[in-house]
Image (spheres, rainbow, N blue to C red):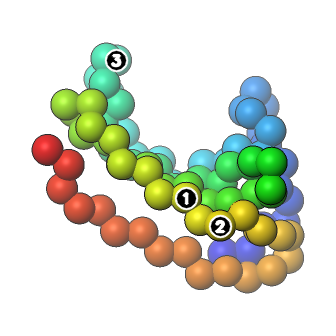
């Protein structure tokens, strides 16, 4: 993927962008996964999060350093969260 901007839309925290978001419709526990971009003190980075209906969560973050107009390969795989 290639970003043309690293900002956020609407009322999102600075630098936060959802690229892929899949979740259930339950109101008490998020169940699903997301691939997104976040911003920390060292710069912008990718984040992948998966959550189960039993509230177990796993998250992986890339190293910071995302830039605009630079192509990068992004991949993520889901395992089983009990």
| C-alpha span from label 1 to label 2 | 7 Å
Q: Quadrant of the N terminus?
A: bottom right
Q: In the image, which disc is placed on residue 61?
A: 1
Query: In 3D space, how far apart are the residues under numbered discs 1 and 3 (Cα atoms)?
Result: 26 Å
Assign a secondary structure to mark 3. Answer: loop
Secondary structure of the residue carrying numbered label 1: strand
Q: CA distance from mark 2 to mark 3?
A: 32 Å
Residue name at image x 85 percent, y 59 percent: 5
Is 12 placed left or right of 59 in the picture?
Answer: right
Instruction: Tell me where residue 53 appears, x and y as whole percent.
Output: 21, 33
Residue named by callout 3: 27
Tell me the mark number nearer the camera, choosing from 1 and 3.
Answer: 1
Mark sitting earlier along the chain (1/3): 3
Question: Is residue 24 among what the camera can see?
Answer: no
Examine the rendered structure and indicate whether residue 8 appears above or below residue 46: above
Which mark sits nearer the N-terminus, 2 or 3? Answer: 3
Q: Which mark is residue 33?
A: none
Q: Pinpoint residue 72: horizontal percent, then vertical percent.
A: 67, 80
What residue do we see at 20% from left, 49% from top? 81
Q: Please state the horizontal and vertical placement of residue 23, each as a whole percent of the image.
A: 36, 39
Q: Which mark is residue 63?
A: 2
Q: Residue at x 74, y 33 (%)?
A: 13
Q: Is residue 57 left or right of residue 82?
A: right
Depth check: give the residue in front, 31 or 42: 42
Secondary structure state at the residue bearing disc 2:
loop
User: Does the image show residue 1?
Assistant: yes
Say above or below: 26 vs 19: above
Q: Residue at x 80, y 38 (%)?
A: 14
Rate crowding at label 3 as few (under 14), some (14 to 19) or many (20 or more) other CA atoms within 10 Å. few
Label tally: 3
């Amino acid at each position: 993927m290639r970003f043309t901007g690293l900002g956020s839309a609407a009322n999102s925290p600075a630098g936060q962008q959802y690229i892929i978001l899949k979740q259930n419709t339950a109101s008490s526990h998020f169940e699903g996964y997301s691939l997104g971009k976040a911003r920390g003190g060292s710069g912008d980075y990718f984040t992948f999060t998966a959550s189960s209906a039993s509230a177990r969560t796993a998250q992986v973050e890339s190293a910071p350093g995302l830039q605009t107009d630079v192509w990068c390969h992004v991949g993520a795989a889901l395992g089983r969260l009990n």
